Amino acid sequence: MKKILLLAMLGFVATIAFAQKSVSASSPDGQTTVTVTIGDRIYYDVESHGEKLFQQSHIGMTLRDRTLGAQPVLKGKKVRRVSETITPIHPLKFNKVENNYTQLTLTMGGGYQVEWRVYNDGVAYRFVTALKGDIEVMSEDGTWQLAAPAKLVLQQTGGFKTGCEELYSVVASNEWKTDDKMSELPILVMGDISEFDLFDYPGTFLKSAGNNAFTILQPKTPIEFEDGSDRSHKILKEADYVAKTTGTRTFPWRYMYITQSDTQLPENTMPVRLAPANAIGDASWIKVGQTCWDWLNGIPYGPDVTFKAGINFDTFKYFVDFAARNGVGYILMDEGWALNTRDPFHTNPDVHLPELLAYAKDKGVGIIVWLPWLTVDHNMNLFAQFEEWGIKGVKIDFMDRQDQWMVNFYERAAREAAKHHIFIDFHGAFHPSGLDYKYPNVLTYEGVRGMEFNSECKPDNSLWLPFIRNAVGPMDYTPGSMLNYQPEHHHGDRPICPGVGTKAYNMAVFVLFESNLQMLMDNPCRYDQWPDCRDFLTSVPVNWDETRVLAAEAGQYCITAKRKGNKWFIGAITNNNERNIQIKLDFLPAGKQYKMTSFSDGVNAHIMAMDYLRKESLVSSTTTLPIHMVRNGGWCASISE
């Protein structure tokens, strides 16, 4: 998997030429160049660090009455250099992000532009239209043509209705056939390819076009439907278009993130750099953090449990008490808190919601509730009611689509929730595409094969997540299992859901996997059985000032250090292969010694995954740490003054 890593800022180079109707623009460091050729279509080549990556790829958009990009006429061009510093509201990786790029805007005959951004580490493009009235987009005519065969990492699906939880597959580009399954975004090929700034428009899938190329597919817009269940539409009729939208607008970015080293992929900040502006104004009321959760392991037990556990007041009070003792900001009540999943206003009388809300507020713990998306859609006034009750957030589930209608539902829900100071966790969702920047009350998305899959959530698949899924935004993976098995020994289901991989692995992903609302998926009573592990997990921040990937190979292993204030955390995980890797701590300020508390795989963890070793030691910037991980194992540590 060859990648181009662009490190140095060597100066600004922007070239504009019309030889053979070509226009070129180069990145600020001069190492990445996009060449756009105006012929019967709009073609483009991408070259980075002296190597051709994409060649004769083309872009276009077919409307009802015309095709943008067919027999194009270049009317004008503009190039400018942008250099700015972005301060994210929710810094998943860095609290400051440098945004330096060359922007090339091509004005075409027919009322549209194509806008390009050329970064040191990536390329993005989008259509901008200035057409009267509404327009109907029939399809996008976009093809990525690789200059040479490459390895692709795909998340292939059999249809547009999907929760984006399929396993990753590794496919050679010249072996991905036109009749093979399409892939969701993002995909990994010499870097990440994805989309961003997705509003009033369907999500994109990729399909093989043969000959090392892939093309865009999008779902049609549903225009007639009825409720199929409490959590799903039955679509009765689709339009012949993929979107009906205003004729004057910007369309989603399609971008590629280009690196030479796998260590750069988990540090991807392209989503921050392409993000739309915050639409809600003051976001200081939004509090990120950790949450307890009752769905997978909701029945507490032990000598301190003197009540009948279940979906009732005493059980949730137990969760609240644990959260309060351990500095966890929220508890999430999943299905069952409401008397009926279709009715968000009448609660299960066993829960005693008003009393529970008052109790939790007094303890400094917020309440989050789960609902099917269809119930939210039918009751948009629920956000006003929830604000009055004191509910802090809503987990909205089972969308499982990304057609234009559903993409617009996401935004309607986010907008209405923001009006009433409520945050959202989108479960049963597709990947983040910009909504969480426009509406920062959207804290996280599922769209990942996470711990809910029990034995089917194996490290061999999860090792791709820092390089692909988490590289494009927050994910609700639901980590933190205290019951741990190697894959061949895994067994269990609700209400006793273990995690695949060693205990050190399951703790390390708490550092590695990013979410503005991080779940503690296990039961409080089990965390209290391992207080050293509990105290580590509940101390891990969800937002970071700095992220450094120390060693990584995509899909194989990942070791990352993250800083919050003066404290560092390190997480390391491996797939089904045992590893011995040495890392340097030269990122620590020199001249001091630091206390490190680490958790590593025990000597028998390759068989008995629960086996772990906790160790305290002193380290400094000159320390080189040997890290040993058994198969499906991990290592994690906190470092403080």
Image (cartoon, rainbow, N blue to C red):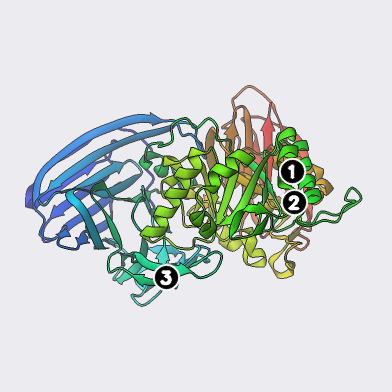
Q: Are marks 3 and 1 in contact (CB under 8 Å)?
A: no
Quadrant for the N terminus, please: bottom left
Quarter-wise, where is residue 158 in the image? bottom left
Residue closest to the eye, 222 or 101: 222
Q: Position of residue 594 (x, y in %)?
A: 69, 28
Check whether the beta carbons of the residues at disc 2 and disc 1 lie within 8 A of each other.
Answer: yes
The answer to whether any part of residue 598 appears in the image is: no
Q: Which residue is mark 2?
A: 351
User: Which quadrant of the structure image shows residue 238?
Assistant: bottom left
Identify the mark nearer the N-term, 3 or 1: 3
Tell me the element at label 2: loop
Q: What residue lies at 82% left-to-right and 46% top-to-bottom? A: 528
Residue at the disc numbered 1: 356
The residue at the far front in this view is 346
Q: Residues within 10 Å of mark 3 (few under 14, many from 20)?
A: some
Q: Residue at left 36%, top 72%?
A: 237
Q: Give the numbered dot on residue 235.
A: 3
- Looking at the rendered structure, the kind of residue marked 1 is Leu
CA–CA distance between discs 3 and 1?
A: 39 Å
Residue type marked 2: Val
Name the mark on residue 281: none
